[in-house]
Amino acid sequence: MLERLQKVLAQAGVASRRQSEELIVQGRVEVNGKKITELGTKVNPQEDIILVDGKPINQEEEKVYFLLNKPAGYISSAKDPEGRPTVLDFFSSVRQRIYPVGRLDYDTEGLILLTNDGELTHALTHPSHEISKVYLARVEGVPQKETLRQFARGLQLEDGITAPAKIFIQDISKGKALLEIEIHEGRNRQVRRMCEAIGHPVVYLKRTKVGPLELGDLPRGHFRPLSRKEVKELKKLLEK
């Protein structure tokens, strides 16, 4: 059965479907000895010999799922051209080739999912699923009630109006408010830009929840495998 090459790469745990497309365009994928750069290419995963960076893909690789409490100062990608540390530095003991699901800013800490399940990654990062994400943001000053209502209505940013968000003040310390913010969009540095737009810049940001996954008391810089129940809840959420 013929399937798109990027889908086969994602199913084999090479990378997410979007990242697999980048690998193809970069000329890093070969099929039966021929370098492939066309995204529309279809292959037979049972018969064709598929190499990525000269190494054969593993069609039968066990699917694994990890939740990491990312510290600030780490890049949410497999490699960084500037040589900065990445989230994969924490997973040297994991034999599967995993990759992060979505992004978490370099200077933001908290929950990030890593897996080799390309189909799940594609579904989780697709805008149509509107997966909720919860952040704790310590900001300069204390927003007024009317300012908080702007979050619920949507804020005008340079790339358009944001979808309505939920926001609560959890506490106030030394003139700085700790906000709990829930969004379901995935724009670049969105929470920071939203807080700047209302005049309360972020001084500390942490993601505590993605869909049904919660960070809990997992220490900074540590990871744990997802439970079967958590994986099932993720997939059930996407089915809806």
Image (spheres, rainbow, N blue to C red):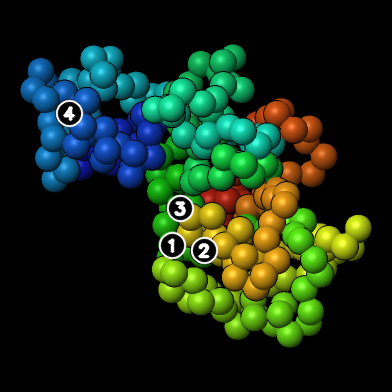
- Reading the image, the residue beneath label 2 is 185
* Distance between mark 3 and mark 1 Cα atoms: 6 Å
Disc 4 or 1, which lies upstream in sequence? 4
* Mark carried by residue 125: 3
Choose between 134 and 64: the one closer to the eye. Answer: 134
127 with respect to 55 (left or right) = right
Q: Which mark is residue 197?
A: none
Q: Quadrant of residue 192?
A: bottom right
What amino acid type should be assigned to the residue bearing mark 2? Glu
In-image side of 80 versus 182 (left or right): left
Of badges 4 and 1, the one in the foreground is 4
Query: In the rendering, at what x and y percent does residue 136 appear?
Result: 74, 55
Position above or below: 53 against 199:
above
The answer to which quarter of the image holds residue 143 is: bottom right
Of tags 2 and 3, which is closer to the observer?
2
Residue at figure coordinates x 67%, y 42% from the top left: 109
As displayed, is residue 115 above or below residue 235?
above
